[in-house]
Image (cartoon, rainbow, N blue to C red):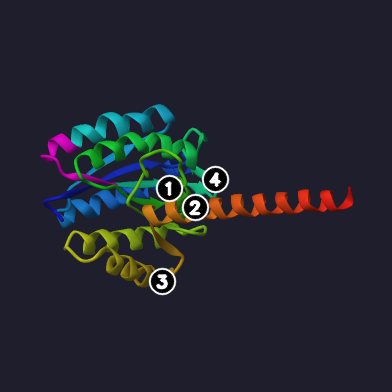
Amino acid sequence: MRDKAFVHIIESPSDEDMLDGRTEGKSLASLLTLAGIPHCYNLVATEKTLRIALYKSLPHEIEKTGGKFPILHFSMHGNPGGIGLTDNRVITWDELCHLIMPVQQLLQEASLDLLICMSSCHGSFGSQMAQTKQGYIPFKFLIGNRDSVPWDDAAVAYKVFYHLLFKGLDLNHCYEVMQLASHNNKFEVYNGQEVHLNWINYNQQIRQRLIEETAQRLQRRRIIF
């Protein structure tokens, strides 16, 4: 794994977090340095700097590492509707999906797929980004917590996860151990293709139900008249 991937950390702490020196992403970067795990740290505060981290810093790092594929690690506050930046701008999951899509397109053209790790509260809600009608699903796998996750749980969980992943262990095994290490079983892993197919099937069922209900109402009207 060390020869194939690197962790692209994008951190956007609140102003209070910065004042208190609470930066989970920077702490993770220090540990990855000690472990010899390739990574790149990006501190962003606005949507503009988020775009720079994705569209300028990321391609540069891919070229710098000789074509290694990125693992996107988002370290910031979040809620079921999206993620928050330092300037209090909320990036909805739909907006983040559109921001990430060009990255995934480039990776898939190179026969690579994107792993996203959400180190934020309600990060697993990011799985809904795979509920898209566009041709590209924005990630292969996404890991996140379905609840409000304490900083210490997130820090321990992802440090263990990357330590094992870059030793070449299976993704599901790394995921299971990160739950045990953090003593937090609310971390979840999603397969983008499965989320997408389930969403399509659900919409088809809803559409079929509406067709049947409409047909029944029309039939009742014929009986009445």
- Residue in the picture at 30% in, 44% down: 9
Instruction: Tell me: 94 left or right of 152.
Output: right
Residue 198 drawn at (x, y percent): 47, 56
Label 2 neighbour load within 10 Å: few <14, some 14-19, many 20+ = some
For marks 3 and 4, the one nearer the N-term is: 4
Q: Nearer the viewer, residue 113 or 164?
A: 113
Secondary structure beneath dot 2 equals helix
For marks 4 and 2, the one nearer the N-term is: 4
Span highlighted in magenta in the image = 62-71
CA separation, marks 2 and 3? 31 Å
Q: Provide the residue designation for mark 2.
A: 199
Secondary structure beneath dot 3 equals loop
Rendered view: 104 above or below 123:
above
CA separation, marks 3 and 4? 25 Å
Q: Provide the residue designation for mark 3.
A: 183
For marks 2 and 3, the one nearer the N-term is: 3
1 vs 2, front mark = 2
Q: Amino acid at mark 1?
A: Ala
Q: Provide the residue designation for mark 4.
A: 81
Q: Provide the residue designation for mark 1.
A: 130
Q: Quadrant of residue 105?
A: top left
CA separation, marks 4 and 2? 18 Å
CA separation, marks 3 and 1? 28 Å
